[in-house]
Amino acid sequence: MLVARALRFDYGGSWRLAAPDLQLAAGEHCVLTGPSGSGKTTLLHILAGFLPPHGGEVTLGGQSLYQPPRSDRWRAARIGFVPQRLYLLPYLSALDNVRVAQYLLGQRDDARAREVLAELGLSAYVHARLSELSTGQQQRVAVARAVINGPQLLLADEPTASLDDVAAQAVLDLLLAAAARSGATLIVATHDARVRARLTRVIALPMPPQAA
């Protein structure tokens, strides 16, 4: 279960995240919506364990994400994240970018990595470098990296933004299948009506108030 209570994040002295309290069961899916500037990306980074909040707490499976601070290995075993900026490594192939998540756990399962890439229509590109992939293909590599370790919590920030309808449905299929396989909580931040049509629970962020 993912629980977030009384979260506060002040940015630049003039912006304050206005996040509702969250309680999502294992296997539950939801869409995170809100106008641009409402803090969707900030909230996802807090829930992913990357950005310590200025107040409040986040727990996953009864364990705090920040007290004590968690290691990269701890997060890699439990949390999969598809960021807007994909942070793929340009000198690695698509396959090796997916393997990075496995390496954090001291694992290597080439067959599984290839299988996930194939599920996203990338079986012909496993050895391609980023310069040989379209923006949409790179986005699918980032999705494969996020799901490869069977996370408890799966977070995606606008994962279909650069994709056509066919590719967007493939990404959603993989996110939902990966969540089902590991019983993961799935949160997708998006403006995309195609996503909202498939994930029926909606958590809406209001525009944040000005910080005092």
Image (cartoon, grey):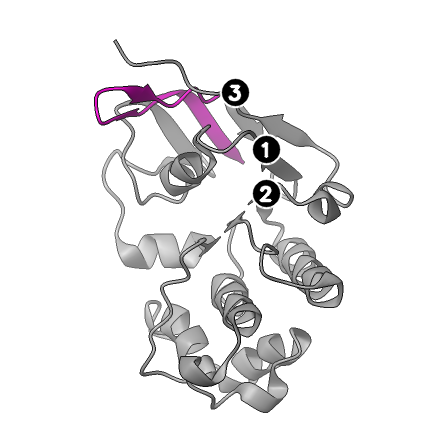
Q: Which mark is residue 190?
A: 2
Callout 3 crowding tier (Cα within 10 Å): few <14, some 14–19, many ≥20: some
**On the picture, is 103 further left or further right than 22?**
left
Amino acid type, mark 1: Thr
The residue at the point 69 percent across, 67 percent down is 167
Percent across and percent down for residue 132 are: 47, 85
Between the residue at mark 1 and the residue at mark 2, the CA separation in whole angstroms equals 6 Å
Tell me the SS state at disc 1. Answer: strand
Callout 2 crowding tier (Cα within 10 Å): few <14, some 14–19, many ≥20: many
Residue receiving disc 1: 33
Q: Which mark is residue 143?
A: none
Percent across and percent down for residue 142 are: 48, 66
Quick check: is 5 in the magenta stretch? yes
- Asked if labels 2 and 1 touch by Cβ distance under 8 angstroms, the answer is yes
Amino acid type, mark 2: Thr
Amino acid type, mark 3: Pro
Residue 187 lies in quadrant? top right
Above or below, 188 relative to 122? above
Callout 1 crowding tier (Cα within 10 Å): few <14, some 14–19, many ≥20: many
Considering the image in quadrants, where does the C terminus appear? top left
